[in-house]
């Protein structure tokens, strides 16, 4: 009985080692499996995942309109004060006052890409973009204004 | 047809024609020394690059690919860096032993080069107890490692050296038994005789299952003897920083690094000689035409091909298996490898006596 256990021990051990070697041998003989991205060389063809969180951006449409209402939900949601919403009041042609954003200041150097602002936004005005080449020579360049100059809120967004 | 034998005989004839025999012999010695040192240097460069490439491809990476075409000159650049680096000696180290240790380890590798048959009639020293010489000298490297560990005055170095000592002393046994199976089959300790005995088929085919078991035991034991993963407890990076060569830097470290690869080459060369027929081309029984075609490939190419195949096998082990614990290591040797190799030796003795092998 002891001998049987001993032999089955050896056989099991060898077969499990061979199983591992089969896997690594497969990888060795199949260069197609290589997952290395040769980054600066393949910059043009680099594919990043949809979900990659690189920085917060505010999408604008063709008429230079965004959907930000200036509700400051993102500012409140941000755990480390990355976003600062500066609001103003716009007077509509009918004479009604309406709250809108003057600037949405985003400080990339403070951002941890936690995605809480995007979740908090009620009108999907901001989103995460897959950009990661953020290095600059001057720190002040990391403080960005997300709404483009002269942009307006899109009609019908409250 | 290209053969190294022709070159050596013409060089020898020329030397003996021009000088008196003593001078000629001395010059031959110098040539051999130069050749073996350059072989070491080239092997170091090639094997380190090969290891990195094999490791990368097994781990689905690309490996070095910037310096030169396909990363060819990466190891040359690394060597240049190591040569220019300052060789630090710790303050409280035993200076003499500390400086001596890497050379002891290298010297063992050089001594082991002597009886290896690189090609047909291309051998430094065809000693009639070649196998005994190899198994005697190969275990000397533990002295260098213990020296390095003790002289460094560092607890990690000492621990690594002690582990290495336990490991080499244990695995020497099953490596010896695996080698003995082939000696039993051949009936000679001389490496050229062992190669000659495989003219009609390599021992791994002719020796049936016992030779195959002996080969597996041999490859496991020499992986442990050369301190390679999965038996790299002596320099376990995650536990002992770098084991016995923690305190070494610059060229002394490079010598240890080189010695590791030289030892791999040597044990693989010996394995190729014993089990795969050394420089002997692949001959199958009495298929005259096939054997004739195989003879056209130079014997040095056969030898190097087999050796590098075994080196690849050992590298494959390294990048597949996780490291053993020290108790598992000794269990494997004393409870599994040694009993199996003893039994295997008995089996092979029966086969040899009854003449069951081809």
Image: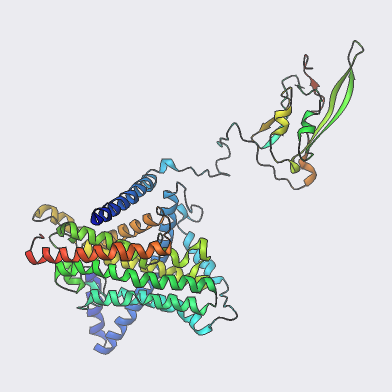
Q: Position of residue A28 (x, y in %)?
A: 38, 47
- Quadrant housing the N terminus of chain B: bottom left
Image height check: is A104 above or below B127? above
Q: Nearer the viewer, residue A133 or A70?
A: A70
The location of residue A47, given as percent across then percent down, is: 56, 35
Q: What is the residue that sits farthest to the front in this orientation?
A: A1
Seen at 73% across and 40% down, the residue is A111
x, y percent for residue A31: 41, 43
| The C terminus of chain B lies in quadrant | bottom left
Residue B17 in percent (x, y) is at: 23, 84
For the question of whether residue B122 can be seen, the reply is yes
Residue farthest right in this picture: A95
Which residue lies at the image location 43% right of the left edge and 53% below the top edge? B55
In-front residue for pair B70/B64 = B64
Res. B343 image quadrant: bottom left
Question: Is residue B223 visible to us here?
Answer: no
* Closer to us: B142 or B192: B142
Q: Viewed as shown, does residue B229 lie left or right of A123? A: left
């Amino acid at each position: 009985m002891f001998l049987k256990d001993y032999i089955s021990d050896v056989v099991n051990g060898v077969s499990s080692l061979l199983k591992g070697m089969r896997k690594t041998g497969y990888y060795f003989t199949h260069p197609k499996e290589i997952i290395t991205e040769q980054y600066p060389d393949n910059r043009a063809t680099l594919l990043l995942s949809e979900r990659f969180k690189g920085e917060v951006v505010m999408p604008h449409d063709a008429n230079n309109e965004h959907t930000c209402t200036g509700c400051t939900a993102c500012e409140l949601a941000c755990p480390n004060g990355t976003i600062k919403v500066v609001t103003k009041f716009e007077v509509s042609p009918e004479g009604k006052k309406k709250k809108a954003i003057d600037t949405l200041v985003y400080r990339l150097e403070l951002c941890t890409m936690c995605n809480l602002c995007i979740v908090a936004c009620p009108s999907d005005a901001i989103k995460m973009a897959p950009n990661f080449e953020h290095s600059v020579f001057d720190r002040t360049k990391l403080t960005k204004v997300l709404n483009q100059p002269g942009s307006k809120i899109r009609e019908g967004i409250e | 047809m290209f053969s190294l034998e022709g070159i050596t005989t013409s060089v020898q004839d020329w030397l003996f024609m021009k000088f008196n025999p003593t001078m000629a012999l001395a010059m031959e010695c110098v040539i051999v020394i130069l050749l073996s040192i350059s072989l070491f240097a080239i092997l170091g460069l090639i094997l380190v690059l090969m290891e990195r490439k094999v490791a990368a491809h097994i781990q689905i990476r690309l490996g070095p690919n910037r310096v030169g075409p396909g990363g060819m000159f990466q190891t040359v650049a690394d060597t240049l860096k190591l040569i220019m680096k300052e060789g630090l000696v710790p303050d409280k180290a035993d200076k003499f032993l500390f400086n001596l240790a890497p050379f002891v380890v290298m010297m063992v590798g050089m001594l082991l080069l002597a009886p290896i048959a690189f090609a047909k009639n291309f051998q430094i020293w065809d000693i009639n107890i070649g196998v005994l010489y190899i198994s005697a000298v190969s275990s000397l490297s533990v002295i260098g490692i213990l020296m390095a560990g003790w002289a460094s005055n560092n607890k990690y170095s000492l621990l690594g050296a002690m582990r290495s000592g336990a490991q080499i002393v244990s695995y020497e046994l099953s490596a010896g038994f695996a080698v003995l199976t082939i000696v039993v089959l051949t009936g000679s300790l001389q490496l050229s005789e062992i190669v000659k005995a495989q003219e009609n088929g390599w021992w791994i085919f002719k020796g049936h299952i016992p030779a195959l078991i002996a080969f597996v035991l041999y490859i496991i034991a020499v992986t442990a003897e050369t301190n390679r993963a999965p038996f790299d407890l002596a320099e376990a990076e995650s536990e002992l920083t770098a084991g016995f060569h923690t305190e070494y830097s610059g060229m002394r470290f490079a010598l240890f690094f080189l010695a590791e690869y030289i030892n791999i080459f040597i044990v693989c060369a010996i394995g190729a000689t014993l089990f795969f027929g050394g420089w002997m081309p692949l001959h199958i029984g009495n298929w005259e035409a096939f054997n004739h075609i195989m003879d056209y490939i130079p014997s040095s190419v056969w030898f190097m091909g087999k050796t590098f195949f075994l080196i690849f096998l050992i590298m494959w082990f390294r990048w597949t298996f996780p490291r053993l614990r020290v108790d598992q290591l000794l269990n494997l040797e004393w409870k599994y490898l040694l009993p199996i190799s003893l039994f295997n030796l008995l089996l092979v003795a029966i086969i040899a006596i009854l003449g069951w092998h081809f």
